[in-house]
Amino acid sequence: MNEPILLAKAEREADGRIAVRSPLVGTWIEPPHAGTLLGPGSRIGLIAHLNRRLALVLPDGAAGRVVSGLPGDRAVAVEYAQVLFELTPVGAAGSEALEGDACALGHPADAGLSPGTRAVVSPTDGVFYRRASPTDPPFVEAGSRVRTGDAIGLVEVMKTFNLIAYGGPGFPPEAEVLEVRCADAQEVRAGQILAVVR
C-alpha cells in the first residue's frame, strides 16, 4: 500500500518528445492512460521486481501529456531502459498550452481551482475509499489539516489498496482540506480530483 518510490528515466528525443524509460527489469502495472497530464513526481504505475513492488514516478524535468506507450490494460514485462511511454511537452507543437503550473504538477488543466489551491488527484483508475474500513472514520473531511504523507484516502485496483497521501511537488508541507470531491466507494479515473486543499 505504501510502496518505496523509484524514479523512472526520462530523456528528450530529437522530435521534442520525452521518452520515459524503465529504470530496471520487472513487470509494469497501472500505467497512465493516453492523454493524461503528468509532471515531476507524478506516479506512473508500479514496477514489480524481485518480489518487491516499487512506485514508479517521473523525475525532475519530465512533464507533458502521455501520447504513446505500452498497452495499459495488463501487466507488461519490461527490460532495463525500455521505453514505457512518451510525453509531449506542454506548449509543444500538437499540444495545447496549459495555464499556470497545472501540467508541471500533474493536475488536471480544466480543474477550475481557485488561486492558491491544489488538487490531490488519483494516480490511476480504481475505486476510491475515504476510510480504511467501513467502521473507521474518514481519513479527511473538509476543514481537516494535513501534512506531507498524511492519508487522503485509498484507491483500490484489482484488490490492491493504494494509499493516496498528501504532498508532492508544488504542495506546501501543511494544508487545509477545502473539499473532498469523491464519495466513499466511488469509481474514479486517473487524474480525477479526489480532494482540494489550500
Image (cartoon, grey):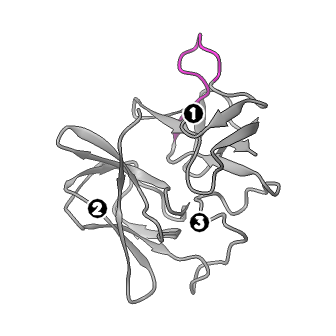
Q: Mark 2 or mark 3, which is nearer the start of the sequence? A: 2
Q: Is the magenta region chiefly helix, strand or loop?
A: loop
Location of residue 22 by image quarter: bottom left
x, y percent for residue 160:
40, 31
Location of residue 35 by image quarter: bottom right
Q: Amino acid at mark 1?
A: Asp
Residue range highlighted in magenta = 126-138
User: Of helix, strand and loop, which one carries label 1?
Assistant: loop
Q: Based on the picture, tell me whether residue 132 belongs to the magenta stretch.
A: yes
In front: 188, or 106? 106
x, y percent for residue 66:
48, 67
Q: Is the residue under label 2 in contact with that under label 3 (CB below 8 Å)?
A: no
Closer to viewer: mark 2 or mark 1:
1
- Cα distance in 3D space between marks 3 and 2: 21 Å
- Which residue is farthest left? 50
Q: Which mark is residue 104?
A: 3
Q: Amino acid at mark 3?
A: Ala
- Which residue is farthest top? 135
Closer to viewer: mark 3 or mark 2:
3
Q: Which mark is residue 162?
A: none
In front: 113, or 75? 113
| Quarter of the image that includes the N terminus | top left
Report the residue at 32% width, 45% height from top.
54
For disc 2, the marked residue is 22
